[in-house]
Image: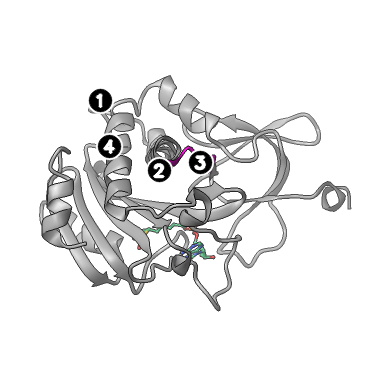
Amino acid sequence: MDQETLERFLSDLPMGWVKYLETVGSTNNFASRWVKEGALDFSLVIANEQTAGKGRLGRKWVTLPDSALAFSLILKNPFPEQSVPNAFIPRITGLGALAVCTAIQKDYQLPVNIKWSNDLLIDGHKIGGILAEARWRGDELTAIILGIGINITSDSIPQGYSLNYPAGALEQYTGCSVDRLQLLVSVLREINHWRALLQENVFIDAWERNLAYKNEWVGVFQGNGHNDVPIYEGRILGLNPDGALRLGLWDGKEKSVYAGDIRIRPVDMLLK
Ligand code: BT5
Protein backbone atom coordinates (compact mmCIF):
# COMPACT_ATOMS: atom_id res chain seq x y z
CA MET A 1 0.00 0.00 0.00
CA ASP A 2 1.14 3.57 -0.61
CA GLN A 3 -0.43 7.01 -0.79
CA GLU A 4 -0.93 6.97 -4.54
CA THR A 5 -2.53 3.52 -4.67
CA LEU A 6 -4.75 4.41 -1.72
CA GLU A 7 -6.02 7.56 -3.42
CA ARG A 8 -6.68 5.63 -6.63
CA PHE A 9 -8.74 2.99 -4.81
CA LEU A 10 -10.78 5.66 -3.03
CA SER A 11 -11.49 7.80 -6.08
CA ASP A 12 -15.20 6.83 -6.25
CA LEU A 13 -15.86 7.74 -2.62
CA PRO A 14 -16.65 11.20 -1.19
CA MET A 15 -13.33 11.44 0.64
CA GLY A 16 -11.99 14.46 2.53
CA TRP A 17 -8.28 14.43 3.33
CA VAL A 18 -6.57 11.07 2.85
CA LYS A 19 -3.29 9.94 4.39
CA TYR A 20 -1.37 6.66 4.32
CA LEU A 21 1.21 6.18 7.07
CA GLU A 22 3.72 3.35 7.26
CA THR A 23 3.68 3.59 11.04
CA VAL A 24 1.89 5.76 13.61
CA GLY A 25 1.12 5.73 17.33
CA SER A 26 -2.66 5.69 16.90
CA THR A 27 -4.64 6.66 13.81
CA ASN A 28 -7.37 8.01 16.13
CA ASN A 29 -4.87 10.40 17.75
CA PHE A 30 -3.58 11.45 14.32
CA ALA A 31 -7.19 12.11 13.22
CA SER A 32 -7.83 14.06 16.41
CA ARG A 33 -5.03 16.48 15.47
CA TRP A 34 -6.54 16.73 11.98
CA VAL A 35 -9.91 17.72 13.46
CA LYS A 36 -8.18 20.68 15.17
CA GLU A 37 -6.54 21.61 11.86
CA GLY A 38 -9.95 21.74 10.15
CA ALA A 39 -10.01 18.40 8.35
CA LEU A 40 -12.92 17.88 5.97
CA ASP A 41 -15.75 15.44 6.48
CA PHE A 42 -14.90 11.82 5.57
CA SER A 43 -11.15 12.38 6.02
CA LEU A 44 -9.26 9.13 6.38
CA VAL A 45 -5.95 8.19 7.95
CA ILE A 46 -4.75 4.62 7.61
CA ALA A 47 -1.59 3.00 8.92
CA ASN A 48 0.30 -0.18 8.13
CA GLU A 49 1.35 -0.41 11.78
CA GLN A 50 0.29 1.20 15.06
CA THR A 51 2.72 1.41 17.95
CA ALA A 52 0.18 2.74 20.46
CA GLY A 53 -3.18 1.63 19.06
CA LYS A 54 -6.02 2.30 21.43
CA GLY A 55 -9.00 0.25 22.59
CA ARG A 56 -11.63 1.52 25.00
CA LEU A 57 -10.92 2.51 28.63
CA GLY A 58 -7.20 2.92 28.08
CA ARG A 59 -6.82 -0.59 26.66
CA LYS A 60 -4.37 -1.34 23.90
CA TRP A 61 -5.17 -2.36 20.32
CA VAL A 62 -2.32 -4.20 18.62
CA THR A 63 -1.74 -3.54 14.89
CA LEU A 64 1.25 -5.45 13.56
CA PRO A 65 2.77 -4.43 10.20
CA ASP A 66 1.49 -5.78 6.84
CA SER A 67 -1.20 -7.90 8.44
CA ALA A 68 -4.19 -5.78 9.40
CA LEU A 69 -6.39 -2.81 8.60
CA ALA A 70 -6.18 0.12 11.01
CA PHE A 71 -7.82 3.36 10.07
CA SER A 72 -9.74 6.34 11.38
CA LEU A 73 -12.46 8.22 9.58
CA ILE A 74 -13.52 11.72 10.56
CA LEU A 75 -17.27 12.27 10.47
CA LYS A 76 -18.20 15.93 10.77
CA ASN A 77 -21.87 16.66 11.44
CA PRO A 78 -22.30 12.89 11.56
CA PHE A 79 -26.09 12.99 11.65
CA PRO A 80 -28.22 13.86 8.65
CA GLU A 81 -30.45 16.14 10.74
CA GLN A 82 -28.90 19.19 12.37
CA SER A 83 -29.98 18.94 15.96
CA VAL A 84 -29.50 15.48 17.36
CA PRO A 85 -30.02 14.27 20.92
CA ASN A 86 -26.79 13.10 22.54
CA ALA A 87 -28.50 9.75 22.98
CA PHE A 88 -27.86 9.09 19.29
CA ILE A 89 -24.07 9.32 19.57
CA PRO A 90 -23.53 5.62 20.46
CA ARG A 91 -25.04 4.86 17.07
CA ILE A 92 -21.67 5.83 15.57
CA THR A 93 -20.03 2.78 17.17
CA GLY A 94 -22.89 0.78 15.68
CA LEU A 95 -22.28 2.44 12.32
CA GLY A 96 -18.65 1.24 12.27
CA ALA A 97 -19.53 -2.25 13.48
CA LEU A 98 -22.46 -2.67 11.10
CA ALA A 99 -20.42 -1.41 8.14
CA VAL A 100 -17.64 -3.93 8.79
CA CYS A 101 -20.20 -6.72 9.23
CA THR A 102 -22.10 -5.99 6.04
CA ALA A 103 -18.91 -5.45 4.02
CA ILE A 104 -17.48 -8.82 5.07
CA GLN A 105 -20.84 -10.56 4.67
CA LYS A 106 -21.18 -9.26 1.11
CA ASP A 107 -17.57 -9.76 0.03
CA TYR A 108 -16.88 -13.11 1.71
CA GLN A 109 -20.31 -14.52 2.70
CA LEU A 110 -19.05 -15.03 6.25
CA PRO A 111 -21.21 -14.97 9.39
CA VAL A 112 -19.65 -11.95 11.12
CA ASN A 113 -21.53 -10.49 14.04
CA ILE A 114 -21.25 -7.77 16.64
CA LYS A 115 -20.49 -8.51 20.25
CA TRP A 116 -22.09 -5.44 21.80
CA SER A 117 -21.01 -2.84 21.63
CA ASN A 118 -17.88 -2.68 19.53
CA ASP A 119 -16.35 -6.10 18.87
CA LEU A 120 -16.52 -7.97 15.57
CA LEU A 121 -16.69 -11.72 15.86
CA ILE A 122 -16.43 -14.65 13.51
CA ASP A 123 -17.11 -18.03 15.09
CA GLY A 124 -16.69 -16.53 18.57
CA HIS A 125 -13.30 -15.02 17.77
CA LYS A 126 -12.63 -11.31 17.83
CA ILE A 127 -11.39 -10.25 14.41
CA GLY A 128 -11.85 -6.53 14.86
CA GLY A 129 -12.93 -3.65 17.05
CA ILE A 130 -14.34 -0.16 16.84
CA LEU A 131 -13.33 2.90 18.83
CA ALA A 132 -15.51 5.98 18.25
CA GLU A 133 -14.40 9.20 19.93
CA ALA A 134 -16.49 12.38 19.96
CA ARG A 135 -15.00 15.87 19.69
CA TRP A 136 -16.91 18.80 21.14
CA ARG A 137 -16.77 22.59 21.08
CA GLY A 138 -18.71 23.52 24.19
CA ASP A 139 -22.01 21.71 23.80
CA GLU A 140 -21.63 21.33 20.06
CA LEU A 141 -20.55 18.01 18.59
CA THR A 142 -17.91 18.97 16.01
CA ALA A 143 -16.73 15.58 14.82
CA ILE A 144 -16.61 11.92 15.60
CA ILE A 145 -13.48 9.94 14.95
CA LEU A 146 -14.45 6.46 13.93
CA GLY A 147 -11.49 4.13 14.47
CA ILE A 148 -11.61 0.64 13.00
CA GLY A 149 -9.16 -2.21 13.40
CA ILE A 150 -9.52 -5.52 11.55
CA ASN A 151 -7.17 -8.50 11.78
CA ILE A 152 -6.57 -9.75 8.23
CA THR A 153 -3.77 -12.35 8.16
CA SER A 154 -3.03 -14.70 11.04
CA ASP A 155 0.15 -12.67 11.65
CA SER A 156 -2.07 -9.89 12.96
CA ILE A 157 -3.07 -11.86 16.05
CA PRO A 158 -1.12 -10.54 19.03
CA GLN A 159 1.20 -13.12 20.58
CA GLY A 160 2.45 -13.19 24.15
CA TYR A 161 -0.16 -10.64 25.09
CA SER A 162 -3.05 -11.27 27.38
CA LEU A 163 -6.26 -10.78 25.43
CA ASN A 164 -9.69 -10.20 26.91
CA TYR A 165 -11.32 -12.43 24.28
CA PRO A 166 -10.13 -15.17 21.87
CA ALA A 167 -8.70 -13.46 18.79
CA GLY A 168 -9.01 -14.43 15.14
CA ALA A 169 -8.16 -13.04 11.73
CA LEU A 170 -10.32 -12.74 8.64
CA GLU A 171 -8.15 -14.95 6.42
CA GLN A 172 -8.55 -17.84 8.86
CA TYR A 173 -12.18 -17.99 7.72
CA THR A 174 -12.14 -16.86 4.09
CA GLY A 175 -9.88 -19.63 2.84
CA CYS A 176 -8.44 -17.10 0.40
CA SER A 177 -6.28 -14.03 0.71
CA VAL A 178 -7.96 -10.74 1.50
CA ASP A 179 -6.98 -7.57 -0.32
CA ARG A 180 -6.75 -4.94 2.43
CA LEU A 181 -7.47 -2.01 0.11
CA GLN A 182 -10.47 -3.75 -1.43
CA LEU A 183 -11.89 -4.43 2.01
CA LEU A 184 -11.23 -0.84 3.07
CA VAL A 185 -13.21 0.41 0.06
CA SER A 186 -16.09 -1.97 0.86
CA VAL A 187 -16.21 -0.84 4.51
CA LEU A 188 -16.13 2.85 3.53
CA ARG A 189 -18.95 2.26 1.04
CA GLU A 190 -21.02 0.61 3.75
CA ILE A 191 -20.30 3.47 6.17
CA ASN A 192 -21.43 5.92 3.50
CA HIS A 193 -24.60 3.89 2.95
CA TRP A 194 -25.58 3.41 6.60
CA ARG A 195 -24.61 6.92 7.59
CA ALA A 196 -27.52 8.34 5.62
CA LEU A 197 -29.83 6.06 7.62
CA LEU A 198 -28.36 6.74 11.07
CA GLN A 199 -31.50 8.33 12.46
CA GLU A 200 -33.88 5.76 10.98
CA ASN A 201 -35.33 2.65 12.61
CA VAL A 202 -33.92 0.58 9.78
CA PHE A 203 -30.44 1.34 11.13
CA ILE A 204 -31.16 0.04 14.64
CA ASP A 205 -32.94 -2.97 13.13
CA ALA A 206 -29.89 -3.86 11.04
CA TRP A 207 -27.51 -3.34 13.98
CA GLU A 208 -29.75 -5.54 16.14
CA ARG A 209 -30.03 -8.25 13.47
CA ASN A 210 -26.25 -8.56 13.50
CA LEU A 211 -25.85 -8.79 17.28
CA ALA A 212 -23.96 -11.80 18.59
CA TYR A 213 -25.37 -13.96 21.39
CA LYS A 214 -28.99 -12.86 20.89
CA ASN A 215 -31.24 -14.66 23.42
CA GLU A 216 -28.20 -16.08 25.19
CA TRP A 217 -27.30 -15.62 28.84
CA VAL A 218 -24.43 -13.24 29.31
CA GLY A 219 -22.61 -11.33 31.99
CA VAL A 220 -21.85 -7.64 31.62
CA PHE A 221 -18.48 -6.63 33.00
CA GLN A 222 -17.30 -3.11 33.59
CA GLY A 223 -13.83 -1.73 34.10
CA ASN A 224 -10.73 -2.33 32.05
CA GLY A 225 -10.84 -6.11 31.95
CA HIS A 226 -9.60 -7.17 35.39
CA ASN A 227 -12.99 -7.41 36.99
CA ASP A 228 -14.30 -10.97 37.34
CA VAL A 229 -17.70 -10.12 38.74
CA PRO A 230 -20.41 -9.14 36.29
CA ILE A 231 -22.47 -6.11 37.18
CA TYR A 232 -25.47 -7.65 35.43
CA GLU A 233 -26.42 -11.04 34.11
CA GLY A 234 -29.25 -11.75 31.75
CA ARG A 235 -30.48 -12.74 28.35
CA ILE A 236 -29.71 -10.45 25.41
CA LEU A 237 -33.04 -9.19 24.08
CA GLY A 238 -31.84 -6.58 21.60
CA LEU A 239 -31.11 -2.87 21.41
CA ASN A 240 -32.82 0.31 22.50
CA PRO A 241 -33.05 3.18 20.01
CA ASP A 242 -30.10 4.83 21.80
CA GLY A 243 -27.91 1.77 21.23
CA ALA A 244 -28.16 0.50 24.82
CA LEU A 245 -28.24 -3.27 25.22
CA ARG A 246 -31.57 -4.69 26.45
CA LEU A 247 -31.05 -7.47 28.97
CA GLY A 248 -33.81 -9.71 30.34
CA LEU A 249 -33.02 -10.38 34.00
CA TRP A 250 -33.83 -13.45 36.11
CA ASP A 251 -36.74 -11.70 37.80
CA GLY A 252 -38.42 -10.97 34.46
CA LYS A 253 -37.44 -7.29 34.52
CA GLU A 254 -35.60 -5.63 31.72
CA LYS A 255 -32.37 -3.65 32.10
CA SER A 256 -30.80 -1.21 29.65
CA VAL A 257 -27.03 -1.40 29.71
CA TYR A 258 -25.01 1.57 28.45
CA ALA A 259 -21.41 0.45 28.92
CA GLY A 260 -19.45 -2.71 29.50
CA ASP A 261 -18.12 -5.91 27.99
CA ILE A 262 -20.24 -8.95 27.32
CA ARG A 263 -19.12 -12.45 28.14
CA ILE A 264 -21.08 -15.64 27.81
CA ARG A 265 -22.08 -16.86 31.25
CA PRO A 266 -22.33 -20.66 31.45
CA VAL A 267 -25.55 -21.62 33.19
CA ASP A 268 -23.76 -23.50 35.99
CA MET A 269 -21.93 -20.28 36.86
CA LEU A 270 -25.20 -18.42 36.80
CA LEU A 271 -26.77 -20.88 39.23
CA LYS A 272 -23.91 -20.69 41.71
C1 BT5 B 1 -11.48 -2.27 20.80
O1 BT5 B 1 -11.39 -1.93 22.12
O2 BT5 B 1 -11.68 -3.38 20.36
C2 BT5 B 1 -11.29 -1.08 19.86
C3 BT5 B 1 -10.24 -1.33 18.83
C4 BT5 B 1 -10.13 -0.14 17.90
C5 BT5 B 1 -8.84 -0.18 17.12
C6 BT5 B 1 -8.78 0.88 16.05
S1 BT5 B 1 -7.42 0.62 14.98
C7 BT5 B 1 -7.62 2.18 14.28
C8 BT5 B 1 -7.99 3.12 15.40
N1 BT5 B 1 -6.83 3.71 16.02
C9 BT5 B 1 -6.71 3.34 17.32
O3 BT5 B 1 -5.80 3.70 18.08
N2 BT5 B 1 -7.72 2.49 17.63
C10 BT5 B 1 -8.65 2.32 16.54
P1 BT5 B 1 -11.75 -2.90 23.32
O4 BT5 B 1 -13.12 -3.47 23.15
O5 BT5 B 1 -11.48 -2.09 24.55
O6 BT5 B 1 -10.75 -4.10 23.19
C11 BT5 B 1 -9.40 -3.95 23.47
C12 BT5 B 1 -8.88 -5.35 23.84
O7 BT5 B 1 -8.82 -6.15 22.66
C13 BT5 B 1 -7.47 -5.36 24.40
O8 BT5 B 1 -7.49 -5.13 25.79
C14 BT5 B 1 -6.99 -6.77 24.06
O9 BT5 B 1 -7.45 -7.69 25.03
C15 BT5 B 1 -7.73 -7.07 22.77
N3 BT5 B 1 -6.88 -6.88 21.57
C16 BT5 B 1 -5.90 -5.99 21.34
N4 BT5 B 1 -5.42 -6.08 20.10
C17 BT5 B 1 -6.12 -7.07 19.49
C18 BT5 B 1 -6.09 -7.64 18.20
N5 BT5 B 1 -5.28 -7.20 17.24
N6 BT5 B 1 -6.96 -8.67 17.95
C19 BT5 B 1 -7.82 -9.12 18.88
N7 BT5 B 1 -7.89 -8.61 20.14
C20 BT5 B 1 -7.05 -7.59 20.43
Which of the two discs, 1 and 2, labels the residue nearer the N terminus? 1
Residue 269 in magenta stretch:
no
> Taking 149 as reference, is 123 above or below it?
above
Helix, strand or loop under label 1: loop
Image marks 3 and 4: residues in contact by CB distance under 8 Å: no
Q: Is residue 161 left or right of residue 196?
A: right
Does residue 60 appear in the picture of this structure?
Answer: no
Which of the two discs, 3 and 1, labels the residue nearer the N terminus? 1
> Which amino acid type is shown beneath numbered disc 1?
Glu
> Which amino acid type is shown beneath numbered disc 4?
Arg
Closest to the camera, between mark 1 and mark 2, is 2
> Which amino acid type is shown beneath numbered disc 3?
Leu
Q: Residue furthest front?
A: 176
Does residue 193 appear in the picture of this structure?
Answer: yes
Which of the two discs, 3 and 4, labels the residue nearer the N terminus? 3
Question: Which residue in the protein does label 4 denote?
Answer: 189
The CA distance from mark 1 to mark 2 is 24 Å
Q: Which residues are magenta?
A: 108-113
Q: Residue at x 28, y 47 (%)?
A: 182
Helix, strand or loop under label 2: helix
Closest to the camera, between mark 3 and mark 1, is 3
Q: Residues within 10 Å of mark 1 (few under 14, many from 20)?
A: few
The quarter of the image holding the N terminus is bottom left
The CA distance from mark 3 to mark 1 is 33 Å
Question: Which residue in the protein does label 2 denote?
Answer: 100
Question: Which residue in the protein does label 1 denote?
Answer: 81
Which of the two discs, 3 and 2, labels the residue nearer the N terminus? 2
> Taking 186 as reference, is 22 above or below it?
below
The CA distance from mark 4 to mark 1 is 20 Å
The CA distance from mark 3 to mark 2 is 11 Å
Q: Which mark, by number, is residue 110?
A: 3
Q: Residues within 10 Å of mark 2 (few under 14, many from 20)?
A: many
